[in-house]
Image: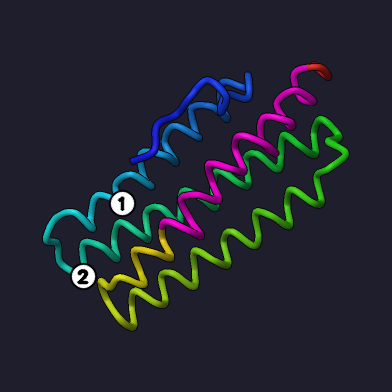
Amino acid sequence: MITITKDMETGISRIDAQHKELVDRLNAVISLGSRSVSNEETQKTLDLLSDYVVKHFSDEEALQRQSHFPKYELHREQHQLYISELQKLKKEFATNGHSAKFTLDLNNSIVNWIVRHIKSVDVEFGKHYNSHR
């Protein structure tokens, strides 16, 4: 399970609240592997995560444009890659259901990436945003 830590705070209350919600949704997906659930429930949980990721990235990118964040394009590209990886994971699940590969891919490409991204790129954006307000 993922826990929001101090080094993941951006100082932007709206973004920090969204990160908490994103982590809660990721934890919901992670918890599916530790209990017996239907494929429909897993698919629904993945869909909820995916929808929220798109909303959060859109909100974050809007603030980046508003504050003229110099690394906006790079950040946006990273978001697009993450969405693409999440879509691949959803397709893999739709094709193969629960599997060791699904769990491994979830942890490696979805969970670990978001933690690293928040701690580095999002925190950097938070410093920029807060210094330009």
Q: Is residue 70 magenta?
A: no
Mark 2 residue crowding within 10 angstroms, few (<14) / some (14–19) / many (20+): some
- Image mark for residue 30: 1
Residue ID at (40%, 52%): 49
Q: CA distance from mark 2 to mark 1?
A: 14 Å
In the rendered view of the protein, which quadrant contains the C terminus?
A: top right
Give the residues drawn in magenta, as a range.
107-130
Q: Nearer the viewer, residue 5 or 72?
A: 5
Q: Position of residue 21 (x, y in %)?
A: 41, 36
Q: Is residue 104 left or right of residue 57?
A: left
Q: Position of residue 106 (x, y in %)?
A: 41, 60
In the rendered view of the protein, which quadrant contains the N terminus?
A: top left
Q: In the displayed structure, would residue 14 be above or below residue 25?
A: above
SS for tag 1? helix
Main SS of residues in magenta: helix
Earlier residue among tags 2 and 1: 1
The quarter holding residue 95 reads bottom left
